[in-house]
Structure formats: C-alpha cells, structure tokens
Amino acid sequence: MCLASPAGGSAESGDVAATNAYLAASYAYWRTVLGDVPATRAAVEGFAGTLRAECAGVLKDASREDFPESSTSFARSVGESKREDEQLSELENELGGAFRSTVEASERAALLTFADTVRPLHWSNPILDQQVSAALANLEERLARPMPSVCADMKAWVASGYRTLPAATKALRAEQEATAEHAFVRPAPSIASLLAPYESASEKALIAKTKKLNKERAKALAGIAGVYGQLAATLGIARERESTIGHPAAGSIALGKGRLEAGGSYEVTLTPPQAAAGRRQDGCESTHPLNVSIVSTRIGGVSGCFSRSEVSLRPRVECNEGLLRIQALTLPAARSVSLRLSNGRQVTSPVALVPPQLGGPVGFYYQVVRGPKPIPVSLSELDAHDRSVRVWKLERRVGCTKHVLKFLNHGIRPLVHDSVSGGPPFTIVGEAFHFFGRIHFALHVDITDQGGGGESPRGERPKLFSWALYRGCKPQQYAIVYGLLKAPRDTVLARTSGVLRPLHKVAIPAHLHAGGLLVYAAATAVPSELIVRDPDGNTILTEKLGRRGAEATETCEGETEDAVTNAG
C-alpha cells in the first residue's frame, strides 16, 4: 500500500495538521515526565521498599544450578529443574512488569493527557489511523491493569514446593503470549515511519527536541536500574552476573593493567575470599585461594583459581580464533616479562603482583598476539633492574588462524514445514557452510515461536544413515526424528507402540551438498526403534531408542506442572 501523502489539498492539509498535533502532544508528554522524575524515583523507591519489607529472601532457596531431589531418576530431575527454572523466570518477569507499571503509574496523568489529545486525531492513511488507535488502546489497557501481587505470588510458589505457579502469574503469562502472538502474526510499520510523509522542517525540529527530552529523562532515571538489581538480590532472585568475564566481582582489587600486542588493554583483578563468600561459582578452595580475573577491552579474558605454589608450572600458550594468548605465574621478584617472538621482536609487559597479605607473593603475566605468525618463542622474567630471573621456552603454536564459518550462497534452506499431532508446528532446516576449507552440511529443527533446537544428525553408520532426535514436553510430550539417508532407495521405519511406520522422504537441493535425502517423522512419543531396509526389504541397520523414550517420558513428567503436583 502506498504510504505517501494522498492527493488533494484538503486531505493533505488535514494530515499535516493532525501530524503536528500528534508531535506537539508527544513533546508535551516528555516535557512533563522529565519534570516528574523526582516523583517517579520516589515511587520506585517506595515500591522497592515495600517489597523488601514484606518479602526479603523469599526466593533465596530457589536454585538455578542444582537439580531438585527426585525419588525417581536423573531424567525426571532434569525435567523438574527445567520447570523450576522456567517458573522462577516467570516470577522474575512479573517483578519486572510490576516495576515498569510503577514507573507508568507515576506518569499516569501525563499519559492520559497525551491520550485525550491524540484520540480525536485522524489521517487519510487508514493504516496510520489504525496504528494510532491500537497504540492508545494498548496504553489504556496497561493503565487499567491492576498491579500484580508480586510478593504474594512468590510466597505461594514457595509454599507449593517450587512446583506450581499462582493463577495470577499464569494469567499474566497467557496475556503476554497472546500479545506477542498478535504482534508476530500482524507486523505493522511504526507510527513514526507513517507520520514521516506529513512532516515539514518545523515538525522535524520538534521531533529533535522531543528526542532530546527523552534522552535527558533516561539519563535522570538511570539510577533506577540499580534499585531493581538491589531489589532482586534482596528477594533472592539475582543472577550471578558479577562473576562473568568483563564484570569483576564486587569487592575485587585491581592488581595491574597493561596493553595487548593484538590491540586493546587488559586489567588483572583479585577477588578476596571475604568478597567471594557465599558465591556459588566464584569461591576458591583453600588449596587454590587466588581468585583472579584478567579482563580485556577487546579480546575477552580469563579467570580462575590459583596458588602461589603453582609458580613453577610452565606458561600456557593458547590459540583462540587467530589470537595467541600467553599466561604465566611469575616469581615474586619479577616485575616485567619480555616475550620473544619467532621474528626476533620482543614485547615487554608489566607483571601484576599479588602482595603477601592477599595470598602472595606471586605475579600474573598476560599477553595476546595475533597469529598465525610470528609465534611466541620464549618468556624472560625480569626483576626491578631488568635482570633476568627466569627464562621459559614456550610450546610452539603454529597455524593459529581465524577460521570463520561462512554459509554458502542460499546455504540456509527450509526443507519441510509440518506439525506434531496435538503439538507445535515445526520446520526442518538444511544448512551448508564452509569451515576449515571444507563444505559441511547440517540439519536442525525450528519450533514455531520457540526458535531453533535439536542437533545435527549422527549415528553409528553415518555413511548409511545418520539421525537425530528433538524432544519437547509442551503442550504435551512429542518427538521429532530426523536424519540424512545416503541411499535414496533405502527406507527408514520407526516403531511406535509396536507399529512400524516409514519416515517421510524429502529431497534436498543439490547446492546444499548434503549427499542424501532428509527423512523425518513426528510423533507424540519417542519411537522405540529405527530400522533401515534396502530396496529388497533386508534390514541393514537397527537403532534402539527405548532408553531415550523412557528418559523423555520421565523428563516431561518432571517438567509438567500437573504431573509433579499429582505425583506429590
């Protein structure tokens, strides 16, 4: 449909006037809420304070790493752990929604004024009219929505033994899924893009002033993200983000900095035992008490637990995507390290020292150079007077290049669209790509609205038939068997409930270099057996899947909320 200004002076002048009124209302809204920032911050602090008082530590025992105890099997425990993780995520989502609703509620008067001003406006472009009406309806629906009882819902989940979400949380999830599905099925251009044909220089200037107000408000409210993080930690649902490379843990001590030969800089930090106490992933054992992270601005980093007794261990040289990374623990006397490369050049870098009171004395050395050559040859540890105190001959790492996976032209191709009986629609995708100088082919399953999954086919006889299995539990248990059959005249059969059924055959375009046919079958349970027969009916391969089927059933029993509740 054409989105340009319609012909006819009256229609165009009406569109321009409506656009000007819309943009003026938007500017007035942002100017108002910028002035209301102190009230918004106070509302957020009040919301967080109430939750802290009523619900501190309510979810502290909800684990994301450890499987719940199960009296049946590991497979069921996997399902229970996944269910608990998903339900905890739903409660986190509810908390985030309540947090956003608190901000919106503080701006209620400004939002309603904006809506009242814009509601009478109309444009000759029906799509723009529909988009503005839909946006106003969504705004009014959000403002009318009651604030979720976050604390009560969290306590109810804990009281159920971390098994059953409260009805209010489920209703919120269903509402969000319906909204997401509507947006996915009916994508539409943005209001800003639809208004553009009616904007003159004065409107564009007003838009620029509005964007400036928006940025100023975002800057003024930047601190509320910290309020949310502290609240989540108080409730017991904060993720362990501090331990990731690039974000040193709170309480860490900077030991030293340096420049990387491959570009960028790095910093070495030490997390003392008291700062790491109680952390599930970062705490180091007494035999390796030095919790050290080396973070780079451009190339990532490393972290780990060390001991000064390891100072005699040989330095490590690792290849990672065309970069040679050198790490070493140095003698207490070392203050710098000279790295000699195979072309004779030397690169000198400082040592990050750990003092005795923090578990030293010991030094940490780190450097990154680009491969494949020149390669690192040796390290010389130098004291404060640049005298060598120790020399290491390094392991030779040759051929360190960056191997980039590159898809062939039209190398990603959907091969089949189908659905599981009583289950979700799915697509099986074929992919052809260059990697390490060769063309490779892979298959994977995309579940509608859930993204990709599964695994590339494999098997005991890949030159005959390689297969893979995708399993799911929602809305009910299902399984998708798929694979690559080398000989087109062979037949693959799946035994389900004692009945043998042939797998569907789908030709794969020649440009994907698959070297066979796609075969697949979708069912409500994992087949107990796969059989390959030649054109004469002879069985040439049998794959037993009974154990996988039993594990899939137990996993879904653990993952399904009703099954767990009934079992209890």
Image (cartoon, rainbow, N blue to C red):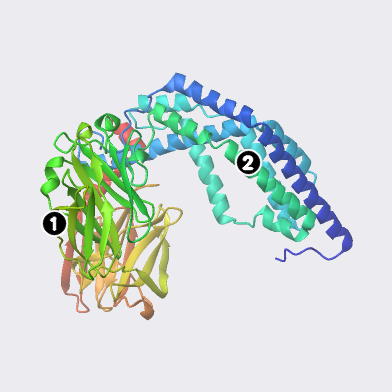
- The residue that mark 1 highlights is 391
User: Where is the C terminus found, in terms of image quarters?
Assistant: top left
Determine the secondary structure under disc 2: helix
Residue 89, located in which quarter of the rendered image?
top left
Q: Viewer-proximal residue, 474 or 500?
A: 474
The kind of residue tagged 2 is: Glu
Q: Residue at x 66, y 33 (%)?
A: 107
- Residue at the limit of the structure toward the right, as seen here: 10
Q: Amino acid at mark 1?
A: Val
Instruction: Estimate the x, y position of residue 61 in percent, counting from the top left.
Output: 31, 28
Quick one: 325 or 30, which is closer to the camera?
325
Q: Position of residue 538 (x, y in %)?
A: 16, 74
Image quadrant in which the N terminus is located:
bottom right
The label shown at residue 216 is 2
Report the side of 526 relative to 445 (left or right). left
Q: Is residue 556 above or below residue 511?
A: above
Q: Is residue 518 visible?
A: yes
Residue 500 appears in the rendering = no
